[in-house]
Image (tube, rainbow, N blue to C red):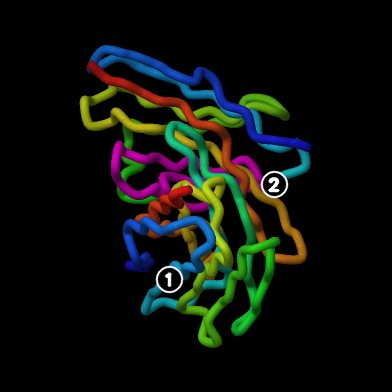
Amino acid sequence: TQLLEQSPQFLSIQEGENLTVYCNSSSVFSSLQWYRQEPGEGPVLLVTVVTGGEVKKLKRLTFQFGDARKDSSLHITAAQPGDTGLYLCAGAGEDSSYKLIFGSGTRLLVRP
Amino acid sequence: EPEVTQTPSHQVTQMGQEVILRCVPISNHLYFYWYRQILGQKVEFLVSFYNNEISEKSEIFDDQFSVERPDGSNFTLKIRSTKLEDSAMYFCASSAWTGDGYEQYFGPGTRLTVT
C-alpha cells in the first residue's frame, strides 16, 4: 500500500518568515502534485513535478521532487497571510489509472 | 478557464436511500475520478474511469457504488443504499495528458450527509 507522510501537520508562523513542508514515502511515484484546499472546497492544483530532482517555482513557492521520486518539498519564502491554508501533496502511481494517493496535509497559518 | 463542476453542492439523505452525485468534467479530459474526504481525514481515492469503463477501484468502492457516463458530458456516482459512514465530501476530478503527466483537476465537491 502506498502512503504519503506529510510534515509538519500544523505550522503557525509570522508574516515574512520562510517555511518548508515535507512529503515522504517509501514508494516511487510517477509524478507528485501539490494542492491547496480551502475549508469546504475542492483541492486546487498548484504544481506537478515529474522528473527526479526537478525544481519548480511559482512566485514565492518552490517545489522539489526527490531524486528517487519518493519525496517532495514545498518551500515558501517570505510567507504572507494570504498563504494561510491547507497544503496537500498527492502522488500518482505508476499503474495505468493514475489515481492519486494523498498526504494528510499541512495546515499553515501565517500571522500578520 | 475550464473547470470541473459538481451538483448538488450539499445533499442530505436518509440511511438506506439512493443518491446520485453529478459531475461535469473538463471537456477534453479523458480520465475521470471520484474521491471522498471524511471530515478531518485524508482525501481517499474511490474509482477511476477511462474509455467508458472502470480502470481501477479502491476497497471502499463496493457493490453499493457505481459510476456512469450517461452522455458526453456528465459523470455520475451512485450510492444504492446509503449508510451513516458514507457521510463525506465527494470530489470529482478529471485529467488529460499534459507535459507534466496526467494532472488532475478537482471539482468543488458535494457534501453528502446521511441521517
Q: Residue B112 location, x and y as percent?
A: 36, 24
Q: Secondary structure at mark 2?
A: loop
Q: Is residue B114 left or right of residue B53?
A: left
Query: What's drawn in magenta, residue-wise?
Result: B30-56
Which residue does the image show at 47% across and 54% down from the upper left? A87
Residue B102 placement (x, y as % from top left):
66, 58
Asked whether, in this view, residue B101 is left or right of residue B48, the answer is: right
* Residue B108, quarter of the rendered image: top right
Q: Is residue A51 magenta?
A: no
Q: Residue at x 52, y 47 (%)?
A: A81
Q: Quadrant of residue B86?
A: top left
Residue type of the residue flagged with mark 2: Leu
Of badges 2 and 1, the one in the foreground is 1
Overall secondary structure of the magenta section = strand
- Between residues B69 and A102, which one lies in front from this camera angle? A102
Looking at the rendered structure, the kind of residue marked 1 is Tyr
Chain ID at mark 2? B
Q: Marks 2 and 1: same chain?
A: no
| Rendered view: B33 above or below B8 | below
Return the chain for callout 1: A
Q: CA distance from mark 2 to mark 1?
A: 31 Å
Q: Residue at x 53, y 61 (%)?
A: A16
Q: Residue farthest to the bottom? A: A67
Pointers 2 and 1 in contact (C-beta within 8 Å): no
Figure check: B82 above or below B31:
above
Picture residue at 63% right of the left edge, 70% below the top: A49
* Label drawn at residue B30: 2
Residue linked to disc 1: A22
Residue B57 visible to the viewer: no
Q: Secondary structure at mark 1?
A: strand
